Amino acid sequence: MEKSTDNKVTSLQPDSDKSKDSSKALLEQAALKLLEENGVLAGLNLREVAEDAGVNRALVYHHFGSREELLRSALARDLQDRLDQIAQGLSLPFNARIRQMLRTMVQHQPALKLAMLLILDGQEPVRLAPLKDAWLETFEADSEAEKIDDDIDLEAFLVLISALSYGYALMRESFAEEFDIDPVNLDWRLETVLQRVLEKLER
């Protein structure tokens, strides 16, 4: 209990909005981390999630109600983080903007893998280009400023780079193993090639 200056007694709230959001975020991060470590097909043990997050297991049900809702919430938060990162890069020059999107997708690979499995299973609707309008605006501005060729099909180009980003992020380790290349070195080599390809589209 805490006394206020006007001698009224005020009850302290044990679960403020800030602490609630913090414990939810810890659980979401732990869920994605464990899925990355154990593989998405291994399932999700809620006791392990709570232990990894350092919170009581009852909080999983308190915040989410079920394993499925925890996963949906974790994916939604990761998606918002990913969109925020990509949106921050929309002011970059044409070439750097696209390479930044590829790097962001690679950073969020665990959530992307889970999202793709849910999509293939038909459990979740999907928008593969939620920032479509913003991206097309930047491309149109590039074209009007004569920074890229004005005969490029901008929608098709956006689909192409989106497919490249999703595909590489999802299969990065598999390609690295098949070609016997360190994944970080492969990132650098792929980005170098992508930069040279994009330079061909610039004026």
Image (tube, grey):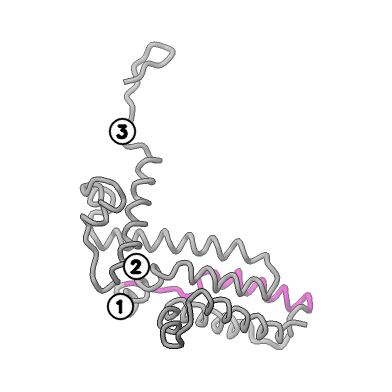
Q: Residue at x 35, y 43 (%)?
A: 20
Report, in whole angstroms, how far the alpha carbon at label 1 lies from the one at label 2: 21 Å
x and y, in percent, of residue 59 in the image = 25, 47
Q: Residue at x 32, y 53 (%)?
A: 27
Q: Which mark is residue 122?
A: 1
Q: Which residues are magenta?
A: 124-146
- Nearer to us of marks 3 and 2 is 2
Which residue does the numbered mark 2 point to in the structure image?
36
Q: Secondary structure at mark 1?
A: loop
Q: Nearer the viewer, residue 196 or 159?
A: 196
Task: Left or right? Give the position of 33 relative to 203.
Answer: left
Q: Quadrant of the N terminus?
A: top left
Identity, as a three-letter code, of the amino acid under mark 1 = Gly
Identity, as a three-letter code, of the amino acid under mark 3 = Pro
Whichever of callouts 3 and 1 sits on the residue coming sooner in the sequence is: 3
| Disc 2 packing (10 Å; few <14; some 14–19; many ≥20) | some
Which residue does the numbered mark 3 point to in the structure image?
14
Q: Residue at x 26, y 52 (%)?
A: 50
From the viewer's perspective, is residue 199 above or below residue 123? Answer: below
Q: Nearer the viewer, residue 90 or 184?
A: 184
x and y, in percent, of residue 159 in the image = 54, 82
